[in-house]
Amino acid sequence: KSTWPRMAALRRIATLISLALAAMLPVGAHGWSQPRGLRLHHRLPTLLQRRRASLVHGAAIAPPATAPVAAADEVETAEEAEARRAFEAQASQWDTRKEVRKVVAFCAPAASTTLAEPLMSFIDTVCVGSAKASTLSLAALGPNVVIFNTLLWTFCFLASATTIEVSLLLAQQDEAAAQRIVSMALVIAVGLGVATTAGLLAFSTPLIAATGANPAIVPAAVSYLRVRALSAPAVLVSMVLQATLLAQRDALTPLRIILATSFANIVGDATLILGFGQGLVGAALATTAAQWLAVPLFLWLGFWRPGAKSRVSLQWARPLTADIKRFLKRSASISVIFVSLNTSFLLLCSRATTFSTVASAAHQAMWSMFNLLMSATMPLQQATQVFLPTYLEADAMRGPKAPRTAEKLLDVLMGVGLGAGLLLGTIGLCTPHLIPHVFTKDMRLWPIMRSFSGATFVSLLLAGAVQVVDGAYLAMDGIGYLVRCSCLNVAVVAGYLWWAITVQGSGVQAVWKGLTLLYLVRAGESGAWIARKRRQRARARAEAATAAAA
């Protein structure tokens, strides 16, 4: 009997994974249509806020039967009643398969945002690894990946804050305020981009050395960094323009542009590296040119071409003091989260660059693939932030005895995360065993790459579910817990690397074991937090039911 709860949990996980995988199969057009109630989900938070405000100004407790007719501000409007009935119908007719498809339909185009920079680095790695005498060049990409990934995660607040603010303002039909936010974000992007380029050019050698890179690869790494540094303004401006389009639910235009620039990068790498033998400098030139190409493509296709549907015009609008304060406040909290999460990756990648050229090259080949596959799970965090608050508010509106749609949605998201993690982990496990020559022709690297495959599988398997819980942290006021866990994770990773490499004398495999440890710890933290939140919500429902009965 003691094993029954475990078997039930395993069956539940297996059911969620099967539903997630089944939802990715092609379906008819009718399978993607949203019912009328779901089309109201983006309007419900505003309606609920209006309803709460009316209750705050009115009576918080229902009047007795002999009381006079309620005041006008306590009466439920027709629009609020329509939203409430739609969500009650959704709760009573919960369709898990439909919810899974809705999540997948959101995540698929949103992946273009998170895959842009990792895809460029992955293309560089594959093209450099395919060239002759590529082992040194492949190893030299490692320190640059550390630097540019750190910068990317540091400046991710621009995209997240712009998306959130513009989407909220457009939902309120305040297009002038949205234009002010975009203008301010573009000015910040240009300023930070120019400053970043100047800093990378001035301190290129010390920055490469600070990663702990093997001295043999420092000159090649510096040559790549100095060329790639010129792309910083283009990357940040494209990030803001892309966020503005996503805030207007235009995911197709960014996807087209990412595909076009990726193709341009492939052509440039093939021409400069394989055709003219330019090596790392050629890879940096091709990537920089492709990233600058993205700026006019975003401007023309998204905003300036005839027939463009953007509601935000790219004209200068001076932001108000309230706009600046709100944008900076949101940016600060998001930046702290992204930087704290990236610090553990920074420790792992920096430690890997201290080994031999062969070991560093093998690590870089596998890390570029892991980074690309891991970034494919990040839209699950965005989906959780978008959908979960609406369901939480709807549950609170319906009362303690209504079905818990937020918990069901979280189960769906976790199932999609586990299904995506299983698929991506399988790709990461099989690639070094089946097609290692795609990354490098140096057969000395292949056994080392294969030794990382188990850690890659476990980490990617857990990555999707961890991303879902990270989104739940942000949606359910768990930012403080997330920051504390991130600090703890940094200490755990640093302590393990010191023990495994300095004390035990382990090789580069210790870096990937540390990655597995990081995701196991994060999964444990996520599970503990979700369990605690569910206990709190169950206790609150029981207390509310008791109070209602009394």
Image (spheres, rainbow, N blue to C red):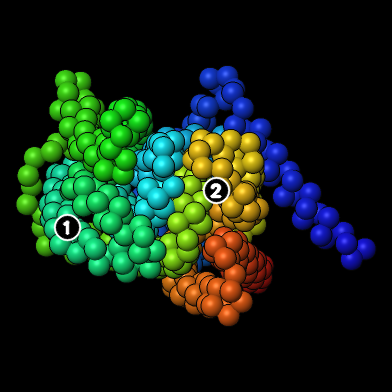
Residue flagged by tag 1: what amino acid is it? Leu
Which residue lies under the disc numbered 2?
A: 445
**Quadrant in which the C terminus appears:** bottom right
Q: Is residue 513 visible?
A: yes
Q: Quadrant of the N terminus?
A: bottom right
As drawn, is 430 to the left or to the right of 166? Answer: right
* Secondary structure category for the residue under label 2: loop
Q: Disc 2 versus disc 1: distance between alpha carbons? A: 32 Å
Residue 23: % across, % down: 62, 33
Q: Residue at x 13, y 54 (%)?
A: 194
Identity of the residue drawn at 7% across and 44% down: 316
Q: Residues within 10 Å of mark 1 (few under 14, many from 20)?
A: some
Between residue 5 and residue 376, name the one nearer to us: 376
How many marks are shown on the rendered structure? 2
Q: Is residue 165 visible?
A: no
What's the amino acid at mark 2?
Answer: Leu
Q: What residue sits 38% from the left and 68% below the top?
A: 212
- Where residue 244 appears, as percent x and y from the top left, is 26, 42
Residue 330 spot, x, y in % from top left: 29, 62
* For marks 2 and 1 on the same chain, the one whose residue lies earlier in the sequence: 1
- Please report the residue visible at 37 percent of the width from the left and 53 percent of the height from the top: 140
Depth order, front residue of 508/163: 508
In the displayed structure image, the side of residue 312 where residue 74 appears, left or right:
right
Is 1 in front, or is 515? 515
x and y percentages locating residue 312 in the rendered image? 18, 38
- Of labels 2 and 1, the one closer to you: 2
Q: Residues within 10 Å of mark 2 (few under 14, many from 20)?
A: many
Q: Which label sits on residue 201?
A: 1
Q: Compared with residue 541, is residue 184 higher up or lower down, i.e. above or below?
A: above
Q: Residue furthest right?
A: 1
The secondary structure type at the circle numbered 1 is helix
